Image (cartoon, rainbow, N blue to C red):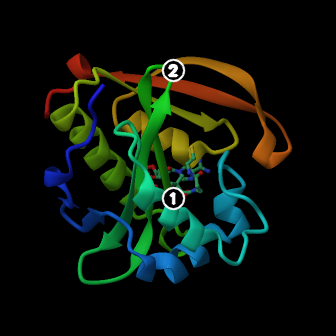
Amino acid sequence: MPASMPASLPIQTERLILRRPEMADAPALHHIASDERVASTTASIPHPYPDDGAQEFIAAIRDNTDRDQLNLVIQIKGSDVIGMAGFRPHEGHVELAYMIGHAHWGHGYATEAAHAIVRHVFANSLHDVILARAMTRNPASEAVIRKLGFRQTGVADVDVPMRGGVFTSSFWRLERADRHDG
Ligand SMILES: CC(C)(COP(=O)(O)OP(=O)(O)OC[C@H]1O[C@@H](n2cnc3c(N)ncnc32)[C@H](O)[C@@H]1OP(=O)(O)O)[C@@H](O)C(=O)NCCC(=O)NCCS
């Protein structure tokens, strides 16, 4: 199913620009992702983070041709790169993904960026459903998902090989029909 249309990028929000990563973003992304406080609630960021992890990640993103996958750098307008947001394919739908550097937590940036991703998916693809999930020990992520209007569909223990254990996680779903602002 078609997803993002490059012509609709970059995305601008009130405070942020969401754009495709460039190799020059590697130091900033490495700084963010190598922080255990960021990695430990994700299913995909290794810790310790490899020295060339950010370069390899950016190269992989740039080679990616899957239209159901998008990874955008989050940059404060005229200022720092503070994280990443996007989506990946999951169970026939797309699933939200985001991280914000620890120094920038608590300012509504994840909510603002993830909201822009939700609008982007519904405006530029035929997907009618967006999924999200979070470890229940990650109440900030659950709060972000809830603020976006997602409906909780369940809670289950999930094996997370990257974290080396089983983590209770909440599952969420947002339907196009639930949105009233596009
Ligand atoms: C989860 C994460 C993206 C949140 O980023 P952020 O920019 O701080 O998020 P926002 O400021 O937009 O919103 C955070 C919300 O969580 C709430 N919150 C924060 N800590 C909380 C806690 N311990 N308990 C309950 N709510 C909490 C905040 O109050 C805020 O809600 P509010 O606006 O209603 O007050 C960030 O902590 C992060 O990158 N974590 C590591 C990576 C990660 O876990 N990614 C998601 C994987 S599912």
In the displayed structure, would residue 40 be above or below residue 172?
below
The reply to whether the residue tagged 2 has its Cβ within 8 angstroms of ligand 1 is no
Q: Nearer the viewer, residue 164 or 51?
A: 51
Seen at 13% across and 34% down, the residue is 181
Q: Amino acid at mark 2?
A: Glu
* Picture coordinates of residue 34, whole percent (x, y): 67, 71
Q: Quadrant of the N terminus?
A: top left
Position above or below: 10 against 164: below
User: Which tag is nearer the camera, tag 1 or tag 2?
Assistant: 1
Q: Is residue 157 left or right of residue 154?
A: right
Q: Nearer the viewer, residue 90 or 103?
A: 90
Q: Which mark is residue 91?
A: 2
Q: Secondary structure at mark 1?
A: helix
121 displayed left or right of 159: left
Q: Is residue 100 visible?
A: no
Q: Give coordinates of residue 173: x percent, y percent.
A: 43, 22
Query: Which residue position is annotated with label 1?
Result: 60
**Relative to 52, is 116 above or below?**
above
